[in-house]
Amino acid sequence: AAAAQQQQRQQHVAVVGCGVNGLCTAWQLLERGHRVTLLEQFPVPHSRGSSHGHSRITRYAYKEAEYARLMRRAFPLWSRLESLSGQRLFINCGMASLGSGAYLRNISEVLESNSMPLERLSGQSLASRFPRLAGFRDCVLDPSAGILLADRCLQTLRSRVAQLGGRLRDCVRVTAIEPQPDGSVRLRLSGSGTAAAASAEELTADSVVLAAGAWAGQLLSGLGLDLPLRPIGVTAMYWRLRRADGAAVTGDFRPEKFPTFVYEDEKLHVYGLPELEYPDMICMHDGPDLDPDIRESREQREPYYLPELADFVKRWFPDLVPEPAVTEKCIYTLTPDSGLIVDRHPSHRNIVFVCGCSGHGFKLGPAIGQLLSEMATGQPPSQDLAFMSAGRFKHGVTSAKL
């Protein structure tokens, strides 16, 4: 009887997008006993979206308390994935909040009010702990923070999905999502990149999770949802240590002596990571608007914000060569308030979506996946999602397709 009841509850969920949010959602759905088809328009793995790359910062230290609390759900899930896989996915090197007094007070208030650990460092205590941050006056350290090894996380998630029986189809583009009279959802598919998959086809599922990154706006528009999503091209820049006659001190940009950091003042928002496979990375959360379908034609563009970042490096890290050694491209999809959107379609409750991750969604992936898996199978989300609702933006629904 129990087995029959479980079978009755099993649903077939189509997950559109094979980035961190799509993979985490598939993982959670499969662990709950559901059937999952993952659909990805590019060959897997690829560098056309927002989830690829060597590393991502993970942290509790948010200005917004809601996201700090969401990380309480994400951190243990990343740890569980590490345990299940035997792979090291996280480097605990801490995160230093640097910059204006107002920014540091904001971070301190969020961490303290939520009983999250923090340390205040200044002057000699900061210089002795992190020699390369000696030029900064004050720092709020989130000691639980660090680095997620992003590409390794994605590979581990793909392996876990396969182990649990999930089906991943790459080089398949979803061209339309069509709710059906019987309550199911039909997805129209076309091949992208292989002659064998060139013919159009259809897939029917009980529910759909849309985690399509910069392409979410196109698909949601077809469902009558007009959300303020702005894809931009971001350039990650890596900076080498200056080595004059071999005399430069080595090793102090490694995670053992250099944390991740976020610097914010009235003019700049800059983040950085220690030296891993690549040299030290320093980047800004901004870039030119782009159409994700023609992104490659823009990749010859001079790295955005290079003069501002070069000035930042010269001022705060004078032992780094003031020109980046390596640059990489990535897409962010911004919302007007730089917050994520996680919601259901107002007319079709079995279509749920995440979009507009605004450059800080990777670390939240397992928590978002857990919540989306609940929503996609008809359960109420186990955390209040009002702060990520599409309804916080005016005119979010242009028409309700019935």
Image: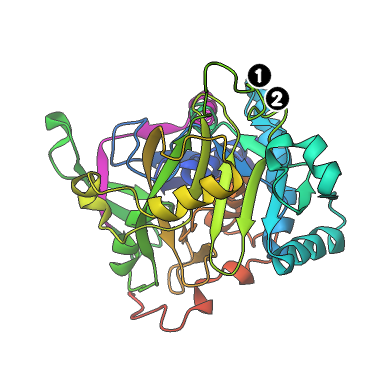
**Decide: marks 1, 2 in contact (CB < 8 A)?**
yes
Amino acid type, residue under disc 1 in the picture: Gly
Mark yes or no: residue 314 visible: yes
Extreme residue in the top direction: 246
Q: 210 left or right of 92?
A: left
- Quadrant for the C terminus in the image: bottom left
Q: What is the crowding at mark 1: few (fewer than 14 residues within 10 Å), some, or many (at least 20)?
A: few
Q: Which residue is mark 1?
A: 86
Q: Which residues are magenta?
A: 156-176
**In the displayed structure, does residue 346 sit left or right of residue 120?**
left
Q: Is residue 212 visible?
A: no
Determine the residue positioned at 28% across, 48% down.
302
How far apart are labels 1 and 2 at the CA level? Answer: 5 Å
Q: x%, y% of residue 327?
A: 38, 38
Residue type at mark 2? Ser
Q: In the drawing, what numbered circle is on residue 83? A: 2
Q: Quadrant of the N terminus?
A: top right
Q: Is residue 36 above or below residue 385?
A: above
Which element type, helix, strand or loop, lies under badge 2? helix
Residue 181: percent from left, percent from top: 34, 66
